Amino acid sequence: MDNSHQKLVGLIKAALVAAIYVVLTIALIMFSYGPVQFRLSEMLNNLAVFHKRYVWALTLGCVIANLWSSLGAVDVIFGSLETFLMTGISYLLSKLVKKTWQKLAIAVVICTFSMWIIALELYVISQAPFWATYLSVALGELGSMILGAILIGIISTKVDLTK
């Protein structure tokens, strides 16, 4: 493949991931926002350990999905910034290990831990209790990320996600 074709294929892959993120978030909208959430689309954050294009794709997907948030522009900005930070850190740290399961474990831990940003956002905007909210959104993230790590780990044995 020539370079322009590879770039186009990469752009299409990123667009598909962003679109899937949005569709999963909106299709399950009753679970996707607020102090108690299980955002199934977050399982896609595991993709970030395979290629930096997914950091951008997931951030874009989060920006679009957060347009439906009751917190409005604040969630679009801070929720999406949190996605960029946690997937970016996952991508960078995963370069330090070789095995896929280790890379996915890094993503699960980083993404779960970083939910403090969402808890802080909900605390400031909605006056939701910080620690209870952090526990709630972190547990939802943990569940989604573990499910995603299993599914994406299986997919990665058949599909090279690094290309």
Image (cartoon, helix red, strand yellow):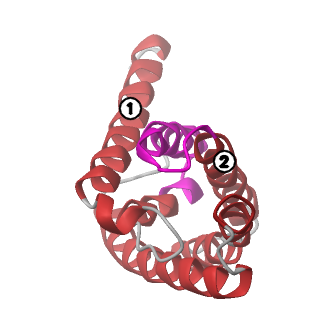
Answer whether labels 1 and 2 touch (C-beta < 8 Å): no
Picture coordinates of residue 102, whole percent (x, y): 61, 79
Q: Residue at x 35, y 69 (%)?
A: 31
In the rendered view, would you say 79 is above or below 37? above
Q: Quadrant of the N terminus?
A: top left
Picture coordinates of residue 12, whole percent (x, y): 36, 28
Q: Which residue is mark 2?
A: 84
Q: Amino acid at mark 1?
A: Ala
* Magenta stretch encompasses residue 55: yes
Question: For mark 2, does the 10 Å Cα neighbourhood hold few (<14), some (14 to 19), or many (20 or more) residues?
Answer: many
Q: Which residue is mark 1?
A: 15
Q: CA distance from mark 1 to mark 2?
A: 16 Å
Picture coordinates of residue 142, whole percent (x, y): 52, 81
Nearer-N-terminus badge (1/2): 1
Q: Main secondary structure of the magenta part?
A: helix
- What is the span of residues highlighted in magenta in the rendered image? 47-73
Q: Amino acid at mark 2?
A: Phe
In the rendered view, would you say 52 is above or below 48? above
* Magenta stretch encompasses residue 67: yes
Task: Kindly indicate the quadrant of the structure image that contains residue 98.
Answer: bottom right
Task: Kindly indicate the quadrant of the structure image that contains residue 17.
Answer: top left
Instruction: Identify the element where label 2 is drawn.
Output: helix
In the rendered view, would you say 139 is above or below 26? below
Q: Residue at x 48, y 50 (%)?
A: 70
Closer to the camera in the image, 163 or 115: 115
Q: Residue at x 69, y 48 (%)?
A: 78
Question: For mark 1, does the 10 Å Cα neighbourhood hold few (<14), some (14 to 19), or many (20 or more) residues?
Answer: some
Q: How many marks?
A: 2
Kindly give the residue lying farthest to the left in the view shown. 27
Picture coordinates of residue 120, whole percent (x, y): 74, 67
Instruction: Identify the element where label 1 is drawn.
Output: helix
Closer to the camera in the image, 108 or 67: 67
